[in-house]
């Protein structure tokens, strides 16, 4: 996936939240894979372009994004990680405002 494609994913997700006329917050965390430093700004620019506020929490374990999404009362959490997959891969895990992981995942390969 390219940075442009990642930006469009964030914009499409942000479009969903435009149904309510208020500022929405998204928490973004990542693991230590090198590609996370490319994915993070692409997602950030997409969310910001849709009027969302972005909270970057840097390299954290996946459960931290779940906890922070709920405790910061954010509308969405995104973890950039491919868990146990090869280091050349990366993916997106989405969390609801309650900190629950959705079933949709997107994997990227460098």
Image (spheres, grey):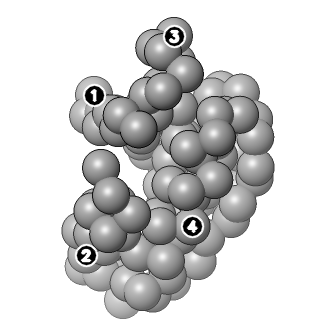
Q: Position of residue 17 (x, y in %)?
A: 32, 72
Q: Report whether 71 appears left or right of 19.
A: right
Residue 35 in sight here: yes
Q: Which residue is mark 2?
A: 15
- Residue under the image location 30 percent in, 49 percent down: 1
Q: Disc 2 vs disc 3: which is toward the camera?
A: 3
In the rendered view of the protein, which quadrant contains the C terminus? top left
- How many tags in the picture? 4
Residue 103, numbered label: 1
Upstream in sequence: badge 1 or badge 4: 4
Upstream in sequence: badge 2 or badge 4: 2
47 above or below 69?
below
Q: Which residue is mark 4?
A: 41
13 above or below 77?
below
Q: Considering the numbered disc 3 on the image, is that residue within a helix, a strand or a loop? A: loop
Q: Considering the numbered disc 4 on the image, is that residue within a helix, a strand or a loop? A: helix
Of residues 68 and 60, which is closer to you in this image? 60
Residue 70 in sight here: no
Upstream in sequence: badge 2 or badge 3: 2
Q: Which residue is mark 3?
A: 84
Q: Position of residue 37 (x, y in %)?
A: 63, 53
């Amino acid at each position: 996936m390219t940075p442009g494609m990642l930006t469009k994913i964030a914009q499409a997700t942000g479009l969903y939240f435009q149904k309510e006329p208020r500022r929405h917050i998204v928490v973004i965390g990542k693991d230590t894979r090198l590609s996370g430093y490319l994915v993070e700004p692409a997602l950030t620019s997409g969310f910001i372009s849709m009027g969302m506020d972005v909270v970057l929490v840097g390299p954290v374990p996946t459960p931290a994004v779940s906890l922070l999404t709920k405790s910061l009362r954010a509308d969405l959490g995104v973890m950039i990680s491919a868990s146990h997959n090869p280091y050349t891969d990366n993916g997106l895990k989405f969390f609801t405002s309650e900190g629950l992981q959705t079933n949709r995942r997107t994997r990227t390969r460098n």
